[in-house]
Amino acid sequence: MIELKNIDVTFQNGSHEFKAVDNVSLKINKGEIFGIVGPSGAGKSTLVRVINLLQRPTNGEVIIEGSDITKFNRKQLRKTRLNIGMIFQHFNLISGSTIAENVAFSLYANNYPKDKIKDRVKELLEIVHLPEKADAYPANLSGGQKQRVAIARALANNPDILLCDEATSALDIENTEEIVELLREINEKTHITIVFITHEMDVAKKLFDRIAFMEDGKLKEVTDIYSAFANPKSDIAKSLVQRVLNVEVPEGLKAKTNEEILRLSYTGDDSYDPVISVASKNYDITMDIINGKVDYIRNKPFGMLIVILRGEDAERKKALEYISKNVYKLERLGGR
Ligand SMILES: Nc1ncnc2c1ncn2[C@@H]1O[C@H](COP(=O)(O)OP(=O)(O)OP(=O)(O)O)[C@@H](O)[C@H]1O
């Protein structure tokens, strides 16, 4: 387990002090894929770099497997860092070396038995599905393939933790999917703990088990990925999630009508329940659907509908009672 306790990172910009990470406490479970999202400048990269002490915190404890590594001497820290692989947005491969040499580099650097290096490189390239590229050079690989090499290199010494700093942000949609799938596959097979930072909510949706939302150096919300999308609580989570789901009242309609506009959220198998048709049949109301979407978060359906509810006050009230009991969340977006 990784535990961050009251982490501050303060940078000195001339005479001005700037807190990039502000009193963050967090527990990341062994074997989970934990994501940190937030807008640019939120402090995500700084925080993730604290986990392997690439960035030393100004205050706080970084507890890995029970020990506060901020107290470690150089030798202990070196050993701990072998247990933490890291990949970056721009892959950081050595352009003049072959793919096999790039992967072998980590093994040489850490005194891996020389006679076993060739076999280990082969094994690593198989894990990332690139055995045929051993003798190619980075320039001849796609972005997704380059990131796969970086993953192989990061896994060379069998770490228990993999830190990923915007690892898909330089990739197109297809290559992003490929890396997301590969990381899930590696996590399922090896139970490696993955900490992944990104500003891409589509990646979060497909990859993370749990998610932390960060803004202005502070942690605003930590939750499982399904709840983050189905029921975001903090303002930053609501705004990032809403941007991906994009189920809003059409432009101008709010201003034009004073009718009751509702957003109904459904979860799991409830997404298919005919709440609207039952309400329309049982009460003297009408419900017009003006926007809607069913999405899948890690294969579990999640739906949203925006409707206009019309009818006499008493009937609308009864219908609303029925609806609120039969949907995951009911929000009033406008009208009376
Ligand atoms: N070495 C440094 N010296 C001074 N300020 C820094 C340093 N590193 C980061 N910062 C500042 O700290 C803040 C947080 O930066 P950080 O890179 O952690 O944010 P981020 O959430 O990862 O953003 P992005 O998604 O744009 O990478 C930013 O305002 C940044 O300018």
Image (tube, rainbow, N blue to C red):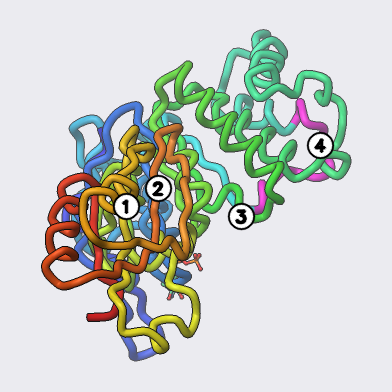
- Quadrant location, the C terminus: bottom left
What is the CA distance from the residue labelled 4 to the residue labelled 1?
A: 52 Å
Residue 97 tag number: 4
Q: Is residue 98 magenta?
A: yes
Which residue is painted at 39% across and 56% down in the image?
305
Percent of width and height locating residue 256: 42, 88
Q: Dot 2, crowdedness within 10 Å: few (<14), some or many (≥20)?
A: many
Q: Would you name the residue on which mark 1 appears? A: 265
Q: Is residue 217 left or right of residue 186?
A: left
Q: Dot 1, crowdedness within 10 Å: few (<14), some or many (≥20)?
A: many
Name the residue type under label 3. Answer: Ser
Q: Are marks 4 and 1 in contact (CB under 8 Å)?
A: no
- Figure check: 13 above or below 211: below
Q: Secondary structure at mark 2?
A: strand
Instruction: State the predominant SS element of the stretch in magenta.
Output: loop
Earlier-in-chain disc, 3 versus 2: 3
Q: Are marks 2 and 1 in contact (CB under 8 Å)?
A: yes
Splitting the image into four quadrants, where does ligand 1 fall? bottom left
Name the residue type under label 2. Answer: Gly
Percent of width and height locating residue 126: 69, 17
Q: Would you name the residue on which mark 3 appears? A: 169
Percent of width and height locating residue 264: 31, 56
Earlier-in-chain disc, 4 versus 3: 4
Q: Dot 4, crowdedness within 10 Å: few (<14), some or many (≥20)?
A: some
Image depth: mark 4 or mark 3 in front: 3
Q: Would you name the residue on which mark 2 appears? A: 303
Earlier-in-chain disc, 4 versus 2: 4
